[in-house]
C-alpha cells in the first residue's frame, strides 16, 4: 500500500474533517442560546405572546443542533487518544484536564437544564424556566471558553516547561490565562453570536419573503438586527486585536496570512497584499495587488512599523506553514465576510430608521430580505476559515515552538486511519443530510401559534384537559 499517504497526513485529514464538521453545530447552539434567553426575557417583561412562540419555535432548531453537536464532538475528542497519543501523553497534565473541565462542567450543565428548557413551560415557575434557559446558554458558552483556553495554550504555551518531552505545569492559572486566551475567547463568542443572529435573521427574512407569518418574523428579524448593531462592528475590532497578537507572538503565521516572503525591518512602511497568488516552491508570489504602505496602519494604526514583520524566507522550510495559499485566502475570506455582515447590518439599520421595516413595509424590502437570506450561511464560512487560519497557520507545530505535529501523531498503520477516515466521511454525510432534512422540516412547518400560553388556561388545567387535549369521551359520559 505504498500509494497511501502516511499516517501523519491521514490523521491530520481525519481530524480536520471531524473538527470542521463538528464546529457547524455548537456555533449555532452557543449563539442561539443567548437569543432564546433574550426572547424569553422579553416575553416575561412584555407578556407579548409573540416572544413566547419565538422561544418555543427556535428551541426546536436549538435541540437539533445540540444533538448533532454531541454526536460529532465525542469522536473528535477521542482522537487525542487514538490518533494523537504522543501529544496527549506530552500535554495531558494540562490539556487533558481542560478538556475534562469542558465535559464535566460545561456540557453537563447544558445537558442538565436542557430538559427543563424544552419541556418545563407548564411544569415549573416561569422564572425557574428562564433560569434553566440561562443555564443552557451559559453551559454552551462555557464549553466554548474551555475549548478556547486549551487551543490558546497550544498557540502560546505558558505556565510551565517541557522536560523530557512532557509538559510540567508550574503555574496552572498562567497556563490557562496565556497571552492568547482573552481575545480568542471573545472573538469566538462574538463569532458564534453573530453567526446565530444572521441565521435566525435569514430564516426570518425567508418567511417574510414567502408571506408566512410576516409580522411574527419581523419581530425576530428586528431583535437580531438590534443585537447585531453592537456585535458586528465589535467583532471586527476584536478580530483586529487577535491579528495584533499573531503579529507579536506568531511571526510565521502572520507571514503566511499576508503571503509575505521578505522581511520588513522595524521603522519602515510596508505594503499590504490585497490579493496575491503565493508560490511555495519559488518562495514568492506569482502576482499580487498591493496597497502601498498599508500594513502598518492595519497592524498598528500608523505608517511605520515599530517591530519587524518577518518574512517566510527567514525561516527554514520545515519551521513555517506550507499551505500558505490556504491560510492567505482563508484569512481574507473571514475578513470579507465580517465586513459584509457589518455593512448589511448598517444598511438594515438605516432602513429601520426610515420606517421601511414596519409591518406594512417590510415585505416590500425584497432586496434587503434576500441579502439576509443569503447571509445565513456566511457566518459558518467565516468561523471555519478563521479556524483554518488559526490551526493551519500554526503548523508545523501542534504546540507552537514546542511539539511538531509530525511528532504528535500516533504510530498506527495508515490503512487503519484510512478506514476510519472513510467511515467518518460516510457517517457525517449521512448526519448532514439527516440534519438538513429535519431542520428544513421544522422550518417548513413553521411556528405553532395556537399553543396555549403557560398558566393561562386554568379551567382546562384543573379538569385535566388543555386547549389541545379536547375531551374525547362519549357525549353521554361528558354529560
Image: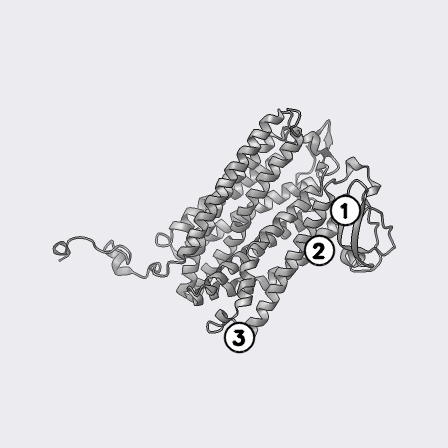
* Cα–Cα gap, marks 3 and 1: 48 Å
Which sits in the foreground, 194 or 94? 194
Question: Visible in this render: residue 108?
Answer: no
Element on which disc 1 rests: strand
Residue at (61% x, 37% y) in the render = 15
Residue at (50% x, 53% y) in the render = 33
* Cα–Cα gap, marks 1 and 2: 23 Å
Mark nearest the camera among 1 and 2 is 1
Provide residue 397's location: percent of width, then percent of height. Answer: 72, 37
Which sits in the foreground, 444 or 237? 444
Mark 3: give few (<14), some (14-19) or many (20+) Cα within 10 Å.
few
Marks 3 and 1, the one that precedes in the sequence: 1
* Residue with the mark numbered 3: 355
With 102 as the anchor, is 153 left or right in this view?
A: right
Q: How is the image coloured?
A: one colour
Mark 1: give few (<14), some (14-19) or many (20+) Cα within 10 Å.
many
Q: Mark 2 and mark 1 in contact (Cβ < 8 Å)?
A: no
* Residue with the mark numbered 1: 278
* Residue with the mark numbered 2: 240
Q: Mark 1 and mark 3 in contact (Cβ < 8 Å)?
A: no
Label drawn at residue 305: none
With 264 as the anchor, is 469 left or right in this view?
A: left
Marks 1 and 2, the one that precedes in the sequence: 2
Element on which disc 3 rests: loop
Amino acid at each position: 500500500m505504498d500509494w497511501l499517504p502516511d499516517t501523519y497526513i491521514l490523521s491530520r485529514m481525519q481530524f480536520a474533517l471531524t473538527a470542521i464538521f463538528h464546529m457547524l453545530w455548537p456555533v449555532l447552539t452557543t449563539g442561539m442560546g443567548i437569543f432564546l434567553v433574550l426572547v424569553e426575557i422579553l416575553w416575561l417583561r412584555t407578556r407579548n405572546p409573540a416572544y413566547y412562540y419565538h422561544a418555543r419555535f427556535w428551541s426546536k432548531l436549538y435541540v437539533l443542533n445540540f444533538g448533532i453537536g454531541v454526536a460529532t464532538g465525542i469522536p473528535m475528542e477521542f482522537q487525542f487518544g487514538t490518533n494523537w497519543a504522543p501529544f496527549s501523553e506530552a500535554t495531558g497534565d494540562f490539556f487533558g484536564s481542560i478538556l475534562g473541565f469542558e465535559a464535566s462542567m460545561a456540557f453537563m450543565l447544558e445537558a442538565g437544564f436542557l430538559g427543563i428548557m424544552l419541556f418545563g413551560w407548564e411544569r415549573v415557575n416561569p422564572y425557574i424556566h428562564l433560569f434553566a434557559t440561562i443555564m443552557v446558554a451559559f453551559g454552551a458558552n462555557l464549553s466554548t471558553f474551555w475549548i478556547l483556553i486549551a487551543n490558546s495554550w497550544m498557540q502560546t504555551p505558558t505556565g510551565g516547561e517541557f522536560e523530557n518531552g512532557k509538559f510540567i505545569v508550574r503555574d496552572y492559572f498562567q497556563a490557562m490565562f496565556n497571552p492568547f486566551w482573552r481575545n480568542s475567547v471573545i472573538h469566538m463568542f462574538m463569532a458564534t453570536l453573530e453567526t446565530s443572529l444572521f441565521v435566525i435573521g435569514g430564516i426570518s427574512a425567508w418567511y417574510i419573503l414567502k408571506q408566512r407569518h410576516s409580522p411574527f418574523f419581523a419581530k425576530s428579524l428586528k431583535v437580531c438586527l438590534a443585537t447585531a448593531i453592537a456585535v458586528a462592528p465589535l467583532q471586527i475590532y476584536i478580530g483586529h486585536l487577535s491579528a495584533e497578537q499573531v503579529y507579536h507572538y506568531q511571526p510565521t503565521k502572520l507571514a503566511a496570512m499576508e503571503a509575505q516572503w521578505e522581511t520588513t525591518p522595524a521603522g519602515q512602511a510596508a505594503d499590504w497584499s490585497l490579493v496575491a497568488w503565493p508560490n511555495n516552491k519559488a518562495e514568492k508570489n506569482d502576482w499580487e495587488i498591493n496597497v502601498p504602505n498599508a500594513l502598518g496602519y492595519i497592524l498598528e494604526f500608523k505608517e511605520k512599523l515599530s517591530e519587524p514583520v518577518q518574512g517566510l524566507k527567514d525561516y527554514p522550510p520545515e519551521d513555517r506553514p506550507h499551505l500558505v495559499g490556504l491560510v492567505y485566502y482563508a484569512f481574507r475570506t473571514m475578513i470579507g465576510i465580517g465586513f459584509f455582515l457589518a455593512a448589511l447590518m448598517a444598511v438594515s439599520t438605516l432602513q429601520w430608521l426610515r420606517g421601511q421595516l414596519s409591518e406594512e413595509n417590510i415585505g416590500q424590502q425584497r432586496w434587503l430580505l434576500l441579502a439576509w437570506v443569503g447571509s445565513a450561511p456566511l457566518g459558518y464560512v467565516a468561523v471555519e476559515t478563521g479556524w483554518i487560519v488559526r490551526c493551519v497557520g500554526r503548523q508545523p507545530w501542534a504546540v507552537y515552538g514546542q511539539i511538531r505535529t509530525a511528532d504528535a501523531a500516533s504510530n498506527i498503520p495508515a490503512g487503519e486511519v484510512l478506514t476510519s477516515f472513510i467511515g467518518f466521511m460516510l457517517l457525517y454525510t449521512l448526519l448532514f443530510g439527516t440534519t438538513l432534512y429535519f431542520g428544513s422540516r421544522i422550518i417548513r412547518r413553521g411556528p405553532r401559534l395556537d399553543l396555549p400560553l403557560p398558566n393561562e388556561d386554568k379551567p382546562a388545567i384543573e379538569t385535566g384537559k388543555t386547549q389541545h387535549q379536547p375531551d374525547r369521551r362519549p357525549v353521554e359520559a361528558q354529560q
